[in-house]
């Protein structure tokens, strides 16, 4: 009996608790595409790989003829590296934004003090 790729992928997704909506959002496709994939007895390697990467699932167990475990491990580690770089950039941006706000507040306080001192000097 030949494997039905779509059914296998559907079982994996449901077994791991992914909703169709969530999977569609992660993969940046519409829900109809995912349902169409479930109906397909064969799927392109790239689609299965994309699903595996999006869901962080190693499909080499279900499809050893298509993938090795190393294929997915490389993709997962590349994804972690990319996420780490994004997180670092976000932290740098936040640091400089906070620094800028702090300087603006200090400048505003200085202006207010200067204005109050000017008012007091004119009152005398």
Image (cartoon, rainbow, N blue to C red):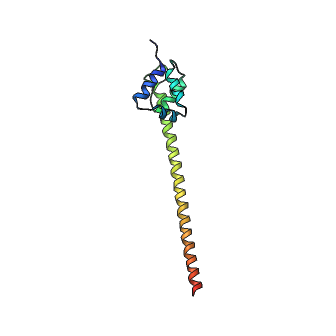
Q: Nearer the viewer, residue 50 or 39?
A: 39
Q: Residue at x 51, y 48 (%)?
A: 88
Q: Residue at x 50, y 40 (%)?
A: 81
Tell me if residue 74 can be seen: no
Identity of the residue furthest to the top in this view: 1
Residue 117: x and y in percent read 56, 80
**On-image quarter of the N terminus:** top left
Tell me if residue 120 can be seen: yes
Identity of the residue furthest to the front in this view: 32
Note whether 90 is above or below 11 in the view shown: below
Note whether 69 is above or below 123 in the view shown: above
Residue 67: x and y in percent read 49, 23
Note whether 26 is above or below 108 in the view shown: above
Residue 12: x and y in percent read 42, 26
Identity of the residue furthest to the left in this view: 15
Q: Residue at x 56, y 65 (%)?
A: 104
Residue 124: x and y in percent read 57, 88
Q: Residue at x 53, y 52 (%)?
A: 92
């Amino acid at each position: 009996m030949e494997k039905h790729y779509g059914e296998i992928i559907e079982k994996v997704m449901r077994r791991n608790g992914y909703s169709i909506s969530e999977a569609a959002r992660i993969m940046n496709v519409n829900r109809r595409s995912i349902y169409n994939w479930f109906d397909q007895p064969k799927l392109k390697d790239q689609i299965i790989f994309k699903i595996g990467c999006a869901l962080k699932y190693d499909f080499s167990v279900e499809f050893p003829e298509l993938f090795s475990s190393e294929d997915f491990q490389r993709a997962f580690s590349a994804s972690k590296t990319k996420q780490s770089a994004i997180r670092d950039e976000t932290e740098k941006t936040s640091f400089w934004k906070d620094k800028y706000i702090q300087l603006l507040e200090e400048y505003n306080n200085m202006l207010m003090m200067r204005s109050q001192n000017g008012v007091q000097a004119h009152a005398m």
